[in-house]
Image (cartoon, rainbow, N blue to C red):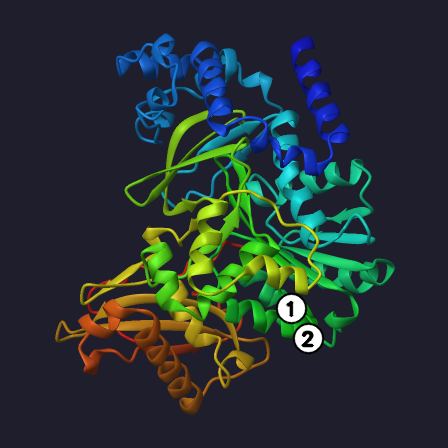
Amino acid sequence: MCPEQAQGALAAWREFLDTPLDRQLTRCARQPPVVAAMALFREVAERVPAYAAFLRAAGVDPAGVSAEQDFERLPLVTRDNYLDRHPLPALCRDGRLAGCDMVAVSSGSTGMPRFWPRSVADELAIAWRFEQVLHDSFRAHERRTLVVVCFTLGTWVGGMYTAACCRQVAAKGYPVTVVTPGNNKAEILRVVAGLAPEFDQTVLAGYPSFVKDVIDSGRACGLAWQEHGIRLLLAGDVFSEAWRDLVGERTGSTEPLMDSASLYGTADAGVLGVETPLSILVRRFLSGRPDAARDLFGSSRLPTLLQYDPHSRYFEVRDGTLLFTGDNGVPLVRYHISDEGGIVSYARLLAFLKGCDFDPLAELASRGVPAVRDLPFVYVFGRSHFVVSFFGANIYPENVTVGLEQAGVAAWVSGKFVMQVVEDADRDTHLELMVELAPGEVGGSERLARVAESVHRELLRVNSEFAHYVPAAQQTPRVMLCPHGDPEWFPAGVKHRYTRDASPGAGAA
């Protein structure tokens, strides 16, 4: 038995249940976030064997870290230089893996899978993020809410974490009920049809591409989504505002700022940030102003824009990539997660938008949005390893996605695709797209041409590298339209990947 573990869980429960959300999210006004980050550093240096060894190897004396500038000089923690060099128990407090009661396994999309232990207290720290979305965006404290967990269940982080955190929010007094069909599409449709009429709103929680597949399949079999007050809780992929509008139209959404929210989550540390009505409004404005977006983000790509609690996850930026400090079963100090992105303070973002003659706070007030949080922003691009290089131009999944969301195409494709660069027999390279059709739809030469033309047009519009680097004769992609759920390109039950390595000499079918 470990009385300390029980006491820690009880203290975390009491704090979560007894602390109003408003008080939790105004901690920045009472204490600078870096103070909390440094306090975590001192505890980790003292209690985590692997981190103590890491500091010794780097010649760092923890006693000498007493100011913010000292903290900013601490060596960065990475998977290679820290996580892979120590046994799992040594990465935990007091070298005890038994101090954690749950283990998640990373997807392995960037290498071999890793194990991420956590405790009830760690989950409660992340439950605040779910409460923030359920309260501020979905008004779940006022509405009977059914949360349908559509993330994969099992060892992966999304499904079990979402179910646990939403149940913890329900224990706080919210009229929230959770059901866990996982990524079983038939079961999702069955529980929605059977349970949603008993609730004021239904939240579908899952990866964007899979949730859209569920919605399209439901429409195909006559499910009237618009009758169930559908809200979307999303994570995992960057999607466009055109995608939000398209899916919202199919579910009967009337307020895009309040009817969906994306989470920035990782197996490494749970949920790091959340979309808010304010961040969505700003992103929608910038999606129509690519010049302003480029000035703010330094890229023609439109990232996911979220707000975060810097007392929970303290972000920094190094060379255009993100690092953070945060507590978990494996506490991480200045962890270089390598996601491309950056941070913007609340005041700086509002000042930037004022220079663009846009007042988001006035716009939100006119729409009756009640909660605006004075929290910093983090923006996140898609993972760089999902990019393909074509004539030196980097092509990202979100560049192609826009082309599939245009009128005349979106109605009969699912939104999923795989892109690759292939060589033909003459060693000429071509951009290939395998595009999944919506349920019940069929291809044909006219639809092939329509997809190719739409993607080509949008690539020229949103990707200046593509427009300038790729010869005109090579710019139109080769397209294959695949049946819904094609086992080779779009297998059911696995996380979708938008890129694939192609062997030299492979060609379009």
Label 2, on which residue? 219
Label 1, on which residue? 215
Tell me which amino acid carries mark 1. Answer: Ile
* Image marks 2 and 1: residues in contact by CB distance under 8 Å: yes
* Mark 2 and mark 1: Cα distance apart in space: 6 Å
Residue at 33%, 75% in the rendered image: 461
Q: Is residue 486 above or below residue 359?
A: below
Q: Residue furthest left?
A: 426
Q: How many residues crowd around disc 1 within 10 Å: few (fewer than 14), some, or many (20 or more)?
A: many
Q: Which mark is residue 14?
A: none
Q: Residue furthest right?
A: 198
Horizontally, residue 256 falls left or right of residue 57, namely: right
In x, y percent, where is residue 61?
A: 32, 9
Quadrant placement of the C terminus: bottom left
Tell me which amino acid carries mark 2. Answer: Arg
In x, y percent, where is residue 318?
A: 31, 38
In x, y percent, where is residue 367?
A: 68, 64
Residue at 68%, 39% in the rendered image: 165
Horizontally, residue 119 falls left or right of residue 418, namely: right
Q: How many residues crowd around disc 2 within 10 Å: few (fewer than 14), some, or many (20 or more)?
A: some
Observer-nearest of 222 and 320: 320
Q: Is residue 509 above or below residue 357?
A: below
Observer-nearest of 247 and 285: 285
